[in-house]
Amino acid sequence: MAKIVECVPNYSEGRDLAKIEKIVAPFKEDTRIELLGVEPDGDYNRTVVTVMGEPEIIAEAVIRSIGIAAEVIDMNVHKGEHKRMGATDVVPFIPIKDMSIEECNELSKKVGKEVWERYQVPIFLYENTASAPNRVSLPDIRKGEYEGMKEKMLLPEWTPDFGERAPHPSAGVTAVGCRMPLIAFNINLDTADVEIAKKIAKAIRFSSGGFRHIQAGPAEIKEKGFVQVTMNIKDFKKNPIYRVFETVKMEAKRYGVNVTGSEIIGAVPMEAIVESLAYYLGVEDLGMNKILESKLIK
Amino acid sequence: MAKIVECVPNYSEGRDLAKIEKIVAPFKEDTRIELLGVEPDGDYNRTVVTVMGEPEIIAEAVIRSIGIAAEVIDMNVHKGEHKRMGATDVVPFIPIKDMSIEECNELSKKVGKEVWERYQVPIFLYENTASAPNRVSLPDIRKGEYEGMKEKMLLPEWTPDFGERAPHPSAGVTAVGCRMPLIAFNINLDTADVEIAKKIAKAIRFSSGGFRHIQAGPAEIKEKGFVQVTMNIKDFKKNPIYRVFETVKMEAKRYGVNVTGSEIIGAVPMEAIVESLAYYLGVEDLGMNKILESKLIK
């Protein structure tokens, strides 16, 4: 069965629908591509596109789309509330099926190289595909934004992975890389005390010494009178849903508080669900090969 | 997205591979059909075939395959350890995706009617598609087997749903109907005492007053020194995995015994996994629409 990759390119145009239409055309033209979302945001002046399909097919369409964005977007006149550094700002590739992180890294590098060669937009490889620790995090790469790139790229530590040490004169710079699918997961507590949610969030998140792949914080759900621990699971294989959930339950006990439920925002990979249920049932060999539908995904 | 049905026809030939090849040819000829298994059994003298695909496509191939089986199998000379009443003995249709039981019943009826009209093999509709309570269960319909059908079908309560009141002279009778996917699920106990497994099995199975869609019994795993409660979940929507699992845990406590794990045999529908994890995490709206890959199943 075929490998499947998801790609979520972010373009610095969220207002001019005719331009956005041109940018997404390569995804619409190929029926083998699943175009799952086109989300323009006027305030951000930015559009997030979500596509899935076979790696080679997605790669070629993404490259062409980046070329079109470089033609129709001029970063010299771009304004928006979201930080940005390029006409195509960032291109995350997410391995969905039968694809290793290594393969996804290779795909990202291939796309980056090709974009430079075809359109002369310099590329930083980021996240799993980063070539140095200082360029793993997108905010670090993007710091200074489009306007600051000219100067920043002269610094030896900010030589791009592909291309010359200067941004494209109108399309800026693009980050390309492989990341794991994010799971946005919120856990409900039977208290209205946001301080308790804050303490639990600190216990589980990486930035305060918790799990390596967890970003977490407190949230008040005022209309319902309770608080949540809200989080992103950045690598569900290394920090599975059940482990975070059970840890939050355990921590909540310290405060005499109970976990009453949880919610998953957006889509979640099947594997994350299967792995977590395997924990609760104590099934050793419950993997994707046991799932009837996995035979239907081509 | 397309509806998906699974079909698991059972043919009364498990030894002559050339004949089996002819019977499965309609499934191999159409690339839109996923042929998941062809399992001949010499002792049973029976072959179980598993196919998945769009309902209309599967239906036509199954009908043609039943016609071929009627040509190549002569029930008058068939011998095997498994009970049987027809060249194609039973044809269960299982709704897998975007398909209601009602739609699956309609499909079963259409196939039954067509088989009678094309090949003059009389049809009993069974399970969810049964036209009377006495013909829900396949063993009830099949009682008397091929040899007894001539007499049995003269009884008013055994008039077939399609066709005349006599078996086909060489292909017998076929049962067609919609059933839910079976989940074969075994729960491990930390005891070697098979009596405890037997008591727990009785507590959960329908035949002893337990859950409506559970068949269960004890099993000794001698080489590992423990026992299991082994079961079929016949309708995972009405008797979800988690509920049976937690009930077995609860019952085990009476005997000072613990559940140490479980195993799932064969394939399980994604929905069954999602629904059970939703219980453990207390997620209200965790459904198939939240699963990334469900967008890839065509």
Image: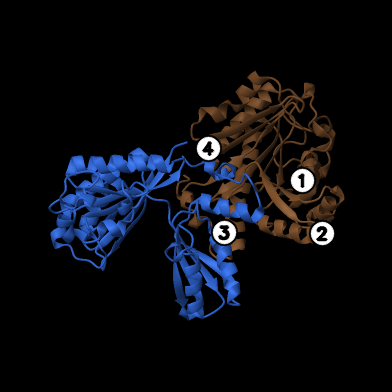
Chain colours: A brown, B blue
Nearest to N terminus: mark 2 or mark 1: 1
Amino acid type indicated by mark 3: Tyr
Residue named by callout 2: A256
Identify residue for label 1: A137
Q: Going 51% across and 76% down the picture, which residue do you hit?
A: B196
Q: Nearer the viewer, residue B182 or B209?
A: B209
Instruction: Identify the chain of the residue marked 2, using the numbered disc in the image.
Output: A
Q: Provide the residue designation for mark 3.
A: B242
Label 2 to label 4: alpha-carbon separation: 53 Å
Query: Is disc 4 placed on a helix, strand or loop?
Result: helix
Chain containing mark 1: A
Residue bearing the label numbered 4: A57
Tell me residue A20's x, y (percent).
64, 24
Q: Nearer the viewer, mark 3 or mark 1?
A: 3
Local crowd at mark 2 within 10 Å, few (<14), some, or many (≥20)?
few
Q: Helix, strand or loop at disc 3?
A: helix
Query: What is the total number of numbered labels drawn onto the structure image?
Result: 4
Could you give the CA–CA distance between mark 3 and mark 1, rounded to whole angstroms?
A: 40 Å
**Residue A217 versus residue A81 in the image, above or below:** below
Q: Which residue: 23% across, 43% down?
A: B162
**Disc 2 secondary structure class:** loop
Which residue appears farthest toward the right when viewing the image? A195
